[in-house]
């Protein structure tokens, strides 16, 4: 399973890369805006930090502008994957830019039908948002299993990226289902590492070691 970091914060990305666990990065307009930096400068810095897909989202909402924006973003760096929203205009843009060889991540997916259309039109990645479904009392993980099941019947070559991840259980469940990618907020990556018994165990080992009798 590939891990992407769901952040545009270069310090968080640097810390994740140091661990050797980061295969890519996802951003969205909210995450980019939070950093208060020039998009191009920030995107290039992230692309230099990560040896893998760096997902940058368009902010246009009509197909012609989306196509121009997708070409511009993809031209910034070889690592860029372009995120297009799962709307009618996004599908039209996807159809054009995927044929030009631009890797597209179709985002804001909330139903199996949406994931089917995106795959059929050439999406490299689809991003079902599980946390936002949980937020409205629909089980997000159910959507992941439905998409994976559906894709098994065909040869789309589209990877399922589990997005809107809120806790380590989401990641483990997605791994059990065989989702290709999960995108993690830095906090969830930290939480996955932690277990209180690990800390207690290590503390005890070191305390015993420090109390050892040294050979005469
Ligand atoms: C990533 O590609 C998505 O934009 C992100 O996971 C959304 O997460 P949120 O629902 O926590 O904002």
Image (cartoon, grey):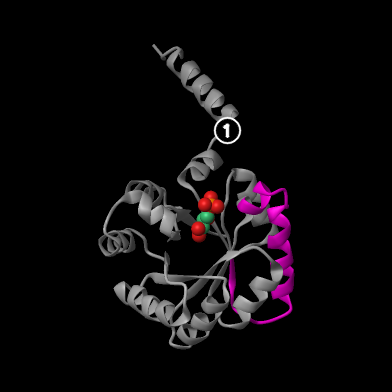
Label 1 residue SS: loop
In the visual, does 28 lie left or right of 196? left
The quadrant of the picture occupied by the C terminus is top left
The quadrant of the picture occupied by the N terminus is bottom right
The residue at the point 37 percent across, 80 percent down is: 68
User: Which residue is under mark 1?
Assistant: 195
The residue at the point 35 percent across, 73 percent down is: 73
Membership of 149 in magenta stretch: yes
Front-most of 120 and 5?
Answer: 120
Q: Residue furthest front?
A: 62
- Answer few, some or many: residues within 10 Å of disc 1's Cα (few below 14, many 20 plus, some between 14 and 19): few
Please indicate, yes or no, whether residue 100 appears anywhere in the rendered image: yes
**Quadrant of residue 72 in the image?**
bottom left
In the visual, does 138 lie left or right of 172? right
Please indicate, yes or no, whether residue 9 appears anywhere in the rendered image: no
Residue segment shown in magenta: 132-160
The percent coordinates of residue 179 (x first, y second) are 63, 62
The residue at the point 29 percent across, 59 percent down is: 42
**Quadrant of residue 71 in the image?**
bottom left
The percent coordinates of residue 36 (x first, y second) are 30, 51
Q: Vertically, is 4 above or below 198?
A: below
Front-most of 150 and 178?
Answer: 150
The residue at the point 33 percent across, 63 percent down is: 47
The percent coordinates of residue 77 (x first, y second) are 31, 72
The percent coordinates of residue 150 (x first, y second) are 73, 73
């Amino acid at each position: 399973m590939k891990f992407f970091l769901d952040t545009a914060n270069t310090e968080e990305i640097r810390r994740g890369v140091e661990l050797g666990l980061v295969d890519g990065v996802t951003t969205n307009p909210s995450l980019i805006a939070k950093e208060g930096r020039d998009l191009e400068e920030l995107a290039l810095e992230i692309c230099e930090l990560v040896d893998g897909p760096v997902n940058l989202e368009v902010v246009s909402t009509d197909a012609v502008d989306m196509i121009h924006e997708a070409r511009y973003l993809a031209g910034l760096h070889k690592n860029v994957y372009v995120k297009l929203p799962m709307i009618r205009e996004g599908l039209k843009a996807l159809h054009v830019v995927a044929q030009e060889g631009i890797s597209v991540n179709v985002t804001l997916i909330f139903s199996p039908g949406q994931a089917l259309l995106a795959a059929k039109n050439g999406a490299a990645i689809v991003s079902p948002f599980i946390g936002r479904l949980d937020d409205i009392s629909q089980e997000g993980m159910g959507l992941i299993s439905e998409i994976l099941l559906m894709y098994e019947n065909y040869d789309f070559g589209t990877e399922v990226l589990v997005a809107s991840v809120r806790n380590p259980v989401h990641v483990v469940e997605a791994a059990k289902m065989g989702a290709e990618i999960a995108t993690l907020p830095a906090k969830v990556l930290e939480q996955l590492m932690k277990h209180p018994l690990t800390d207690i165990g290590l503390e005890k080992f070191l305390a015993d070691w420090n109390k050892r009798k040294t050979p005469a």
